[in-house]
Every structure is written in C-alpha cells, then in structure tokens.
Image (cartoon, rainbow, N blue to C red):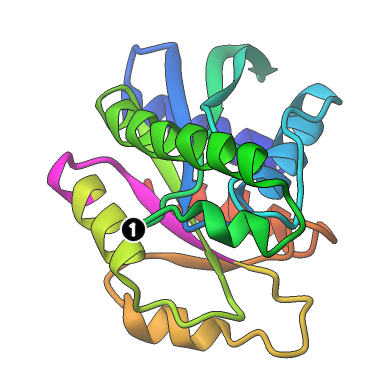
Amino acid sequence: MPFRKFINWLTSLFGSKKSFSLGLYGNVNAGKSTLANRISKDWTGEEMSQVSEIPHETREVIKKERVSLQVDGVSITMNLLDMPGIATKVDYRDFVKRGMKAADAQKRAKEATKGIIEAIKWLEHVDAALLVMDACEDPYTQVNITILGNLEARKIPVIIVANKIDKKNAKPDRIKNAFPQHRLVEVSALKGTHVDKLYKAIAECAK
C-alpha cells in the first residue's frame, strides 16, 4: 500500500516529530497545483487549489493543514503546501497578452511577485519538498537550479517530479540527465499516471 510506505518513510525521517510540512515547489505552470490537488484528494477527498493556464494563478501559499493519517496504528499530522510558482521576473504585459486588462494585469503581477517572495521565505518552515518540473520544457533553467540549490543548502529532502508525461512532447529523460544526483519520478498529475510510484519512491528514499 503506497500510503503505508509513505507514512513509514516520514516517521523514520522525522523521528518523533508528528507534525511536518511538505512543500511543492517549481517553475510557473509546471503543474504544482494540479499535483497538490491530486495529493490532497487522495488523502482527504478534497482538492485545495485553483488551476489555470494563465501564469501565476497561485499567488500565495495554499495550505491544507492538519491532514491526519492513521496507518497500522501510526498517526501523523501534516501540512500540505502548494507554493506560488517561482519566476526570475514577472511582467504585467505578459498577462495583458493573455487578454487581461492593464489594471488587472498590474495587480496580478504585484501579487505574483509577493507570492514568489513568500514561497522563498517558507523554505525555513518546509521539512520535505517535491520539486515539480514540466517534462515538456528544458529543465536546465535558472529557476530550477536556484530552487534545488536552496533546498540542498538547507538539507531539505527533495524528490524531482517530472510532470505532464501524458503530453506527446514530454521528455522526462532531459530532467534526469540535467539533475542525475536527485531521485526523479515521472507522473501525470492531471491523469494520475504513476502517482503511486511517487509515493513508493519517497518511501524508498529512506532505505
């Protein structure tokens, strides 16, 4: 049972700590919120985030707090954190090109910038992380390198999630080759493909 292995991994990783935070990080539109919804629904039966094709739909940390799991007598409470997408710059004109009015675009850009800062600050409170990457895009970007560097510097356990493998142009091997030092799991958060493998991989990391 994937959840059982996941719980055992968390217990061994954090010892007696029964409350922890799992953060989902990644570039804009990598599919973090879709994966967060998938995970939340698996564990609680409810989704937690809005999803949109327009960049920076998530502009503040979305929390699913005190998700309690009981497996084989082990009770663990977790906080699931869907982080705003990280970007090197936010230009309101990009939103205008997608049909937004200038005033709305400027507001969204301001909120998005604030969300990026908030996501970075939350690194101080995250116990483990899933770094979500779009398997259709070049993975070797400044954003991905910066996120990994910050996670590594803080010794935060991380698994790279190659998302959107249901797309015809998906090339998850590019991600594997770019960051061979990290564990990688290929999934489609939208379709639910290989999500169970993600939980298994997390458990195996503790071995």
Q: Which of 10 and 98 is in front in this view?
A: 98
Q: Is residue 62 visible to us here?
A: yes
Residue drawn at point x = 37 percent, y = 86 percent = 177
Q: Is residue 57 left or right of residue 156?
A: right
Whether residue 154 appears in magenta in the rendering, the answer is yes
**Residue 50 vertical position relative to residue 94 in the rendered view, above or below:** above
Q: Please tell me in which quadrant of the rendered image residue 103 appears.
A: top right
Q: Which kind of residue does numbered mark 1 sit on?
A: Thr
Q: Which residue lies furthest to the left in this view?
A: 153
Whether residue 134 appears in magenta in the rendering, the answer is no
Q: Is residue 83 visible to us here?
A: no
Task: Determine the secondary structure under disc 1.
Answer: loop
Residue drawn at point x = 66 percent, y = 43 percent = 33
Q: Is residue 16 left or right of residue 38?
A: left
Where residue 24 appears, as percent x and y from the top left, is 50, 42
Neighbour tally class for label 1: few under 14, some 14-19, many 20 plus, Cα within 10 Å: few
Q: Nearer the viewer, residue 204 or 27?
A: 27
Residue drawn at point x = 25 percent, y = 58 percent = 146
Question: Which quarter of the image is occupied by the N terminus?
Answer: top right
The magenta stretch is 152-162
For disc 1, the marked residue is: 88
